[in-house]
Image (cartoon, rainbow, N blue to C red):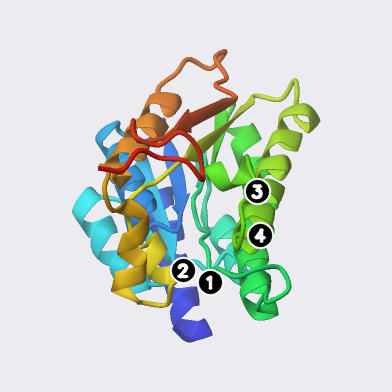
Amino acid sequence: MSTSAANNEYAAAAEAIAALDEGTKVAVVSGASSGIGEATARTLAEQGFHVVVGARRFERVSALAEEIGGTAAPLDVTNTDQVAALAEALGRVDVLVNNAGGAKGQSSIMDADIEQWRWMWETNVLGTLHMLRALMPKLIASGDGLVVTITSVAALEAYDNGSGYTTAKTAESVLHRTLRGEFLGEPVRFTEIVPGLVETEFSLVRFEGDAEKAAKPYQGLQPLVAEDVAEVVGFVASRPAHVNLDRIDIKPRAQHSAQRAYRE
């Protein structure tokens, strides 16, 4: 999308938010074009939030926004100009769901593809940082802000041939947890959600569209689906202002850890 076309969409988003009834709460979900982000947007909309859905694939979030009565925005979280333009367009933000992220490749440290590492760190870590820095003033101004960051069991343990993703998710997790102390006393809550195996487009992205490789992590067990995680986000968002759920781990019953699962 060209810069001028994106600017038109931000202007439209600003108008949509300005036209909301007073008291309507606004949730922003990054990476909302599929998977957990899309399911989360649907869940929050059902709870009465006006949901701003952002993603690189604007055509997808545009269709989603129309379906749920929300607002779509072009959003590459690694693009600071886009993040700033989105923040400027939003007069109010009550909830931020940092969902944009992902993995690329699966190799040893010695065989690491530096460009894959760079993409994972820029998307998972710096992308989350950009969103937080841009929207935190509005979250605080709401009087009851909530930041939900979707990390991964990869943030909890190292495993062979996954260090690009595990290090990025660990850094994102530490970034999120640091906020809890730095903003202590402010009217904003912070929840980290740590999913295990969730069958979405995640593996397809990781293995560059190789469907056979992408299916292997889910074989022999019943994985989570995006809606399972979205329901947890909805639960967090519905808690009273004085309740902070610091971290929620969610895995399939058959999964013990990142490396251990029961498969039939």
Residue located 35% across and 77% down the image: 209
Residue identified by numbered label 3 = 158
x and y, in percent, of residue 11 in the image: 46, 67
Q: Is 239 in front, or is 19?
A: 239
Give the Cα separation between the discs numbered 2 and 1: 5 Å
> On residue 105, which mark appears?
1
Mark nearer the N terminus (4 vs 2): 4
Q: Amino acid at mark 4?
A: Ser
180 or 193, which lies in front?
193
C-alpha span from label 1 to label 3: 15 Å
Residue contact at pointers 4 and 3, CB within 8 angstroms:
yes
Residue at (69, 55) in percent of width and height: 167
Give the label on residue 206, or none: 2
The percent position of residue 76, horizontal first and vertical second, equals 53, 69
Alpha carbon separation for disc pair 4 and 2: 13 Å
Mark linked to residue 163: 4
Tag 3: amino acid: Ala
One can see residue 94 in this view: no
Q: Residue type at mark 1: give it.
A: Gly
Q: Is residue 243 above or below residue 118?
A: above
- The secondary element bearing badge 3 is classed as loop
How far is mark 2 from mark 3, CA to CA? 17 Å
**Number of numbered discs:** 4
Mark 3: give few (<14), some (14-19) or many (20+) Cα within 10 Å. Answer: some
